[in-house]
Amino acid sequence: MPLTDRRTQLYLTEEQYQAVMRLARDRGVSLAAVVREAVDEYVAACESESVAPWQRDSARRLVGSLELPAPEERDGERGLDEAIDRSVYDEIEGS
């Protein structure tokens, strides 16, 4: 368990207190541990929301990952399209 370096006081409603205490008892940890975990999760969720949606797009990892032939190695106008199809769909020429 990480050491804490800041003591804080907060007020909970009775319902919040009872719910947090139930969680703490079920997990065998302190009320403070449950609150710290909740704060960590809340902060992480808020930070991920502040990231632009396009930055969370898993397709973004593909940018720049295709190995395409240089323009002088392409065969005519359809060369790039065919190279992309081969890379993305694993198509073999002539099939």
Image (cartoon, rainbow, N blue to C red):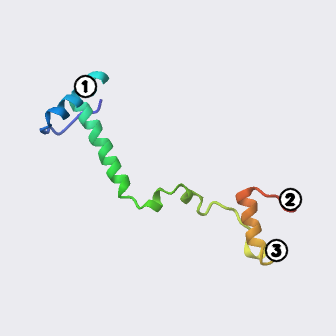
Q: Residue at x 69, y 62 (%)?
A: 67
- 34 up-or-down from 81: above or below: above
Q: Residue at x 18, y 33 (%)?
A: 15
In the rendered view of the protein, which quadrant contains the N terminus?
top left
User: Which sits earlier in the primary sequence, circle 3 or circle 1?
Assistant: 1
Pointer 1 residue:
22
| Cα gap from disc 1 to disc 2, whole angstroms | 63 Å
Q: Classify mark 1: residues with Cα within 10 Å, few (<14), some (14-19) or many (20+).
A: few
Pointer 2 residue:
95
Q: In this image, 20 relative to 14: left or right?
A: right
| Amino acid type indicated by mark 1 | Arg
Q: Classify mark 3: residues with Cα within 10 Å, few (<14), some (14-19) or many (20+).
A: few
Q: Position of residue 13 (x, y in %)?
A: 14, 36
Q: Residue at x 14, y 39 (%)?
A: 8
| Amino acid type indicated by mark 2 | Ser
Looking at this view, is 72 or 79 the one in front?
Answer: 79
Q: Which mark is residue 75?
A: 3
Q: In this image, 26 relative to 56: left or right?
A: left
Of helix, strand and loop, which one carries label 2?
loop
Q: Position of residue 30 (x, y in %)?
A: 23, 26
For the residues carrying marks 3 and 1, which lies nearer the camera in this image?
A: 1
Q: Position of residue 29 (x, y in %)?
A: 27, 24
| Amino acid type indicated by mark 3 | Asp
Q: Classify mark 2: residues with Cα within 10 Å, few (<14), some (14-19) or many (20+).
A: few
- 53 up-or-down from 72: above or below: above
Looking at this view, is 48 or 21 the one in front?
Answer: 21
Residue 39, quarter of the rendered image = top left
For the residues carrying marks 1 and 2, which lies nearer the camera in this image?
A: 1
User: Which sits earlier in the primary sequence, circle 2 or circle 3?
Assistant: 3
Q: Are marks 1 and 2 in contact (CB under 8 Å)?
A: no
